[in-house]
Image (cartoon, rainbow, N blue to C red):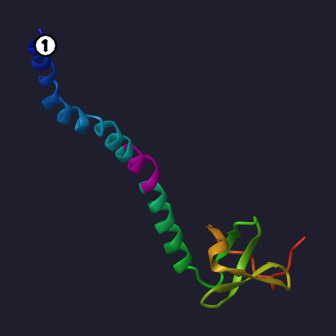
Amino acid sequence: MIDTAYAMGQGGAPDAGASGFASFIPLILMFVIFYFLLIRPQQKRNREHRNMIANLKKGDRIVTTGGLHGRITGMDETTLTVEIADKVRVKINRGNVAGVLPGQAPASSETKEG
């Protein structure tokens, strides 16, 4: 009777290796899903933001991450001078530009007709 118990116990050992690998399959699938749903889109957004910052030029209308709207009047390697009102200029870091607005700002030398 004891011999039969030992014989039955030995049969389960070869399956342990296969179930060990099978337990990692859900973890691998979760990583693949996270990559395509979270990591890859974030990398694409970062790349587009870097390209947008690299292509800024004088006269562009921008929005900062703080919500200020203005026109670029001067540029440095790391900072931008932005005119937010007539004769009101502020310096901001290039990384704080959230987006470029379409169209051009009206020139301050134009006169209003009315």
How far from the left and from the top, in percent, is residue 37?
Answer: 43, 46
In the picture as drawn, the residue positioned furthest to the right comes out as 114
For label 1, the SS is helix
Q: Residue at x 15, y 14 (%)?
A: 5
| Amino acid type, callout 1 | Ile
Q: Quadrant location of residue 67?
A: bottom right
User: On the rendered image, what quadrant is the C terminus found in?
Assistant: bottom right
How far from the left and from the top, in percent, is residue 46?
Answer: 50, 65
Tell which of 69 and 21 is nearer to you. Answer: 21
How far from the left and from the top, in percent, is residue 71?
Answer: 71, 78
In the picture as drawn, the residue positioned furthest to the top comes out as 1
19 relative to 75 in the view: left or right: left
103 shown above or below 15: below
How far from the left and from the top, in percent, is residue 45?
Answer: 50, 61
* Residue 93 on the magenta span: no
14 shown above or below 105: above
Q: Residue at x 58, y 80 (%)?
A: 56
User: On the rendered image, what quadrant is the N terminus found in?
Assistant: top left
Q: Quadrant location of residue 40?
A: bottom left
* Residue 34 on the magenta span: yes
Q: Which residue is mark 1?
A: 2
113 relative to 44 in the view: left or right: right
Stretch in magenta: 33-39
Give the tally of numbered discs. Answer: 1
Tell which of 32 and 42 is nearer to you. Answer: 32
Other-residue count near label 1 (Cα within 10 Å), few / some / many at <14 / 14–19 / ≥20: few
Q: Quadrant location of residue 96?
A: bottom right
Tell which of 110 and 16 is nearer to you. Answer: 16
Q: Main secondary structure of the magenta part?
A: helix
Q: Residue at x 81, y 84 (%)?
A: 89
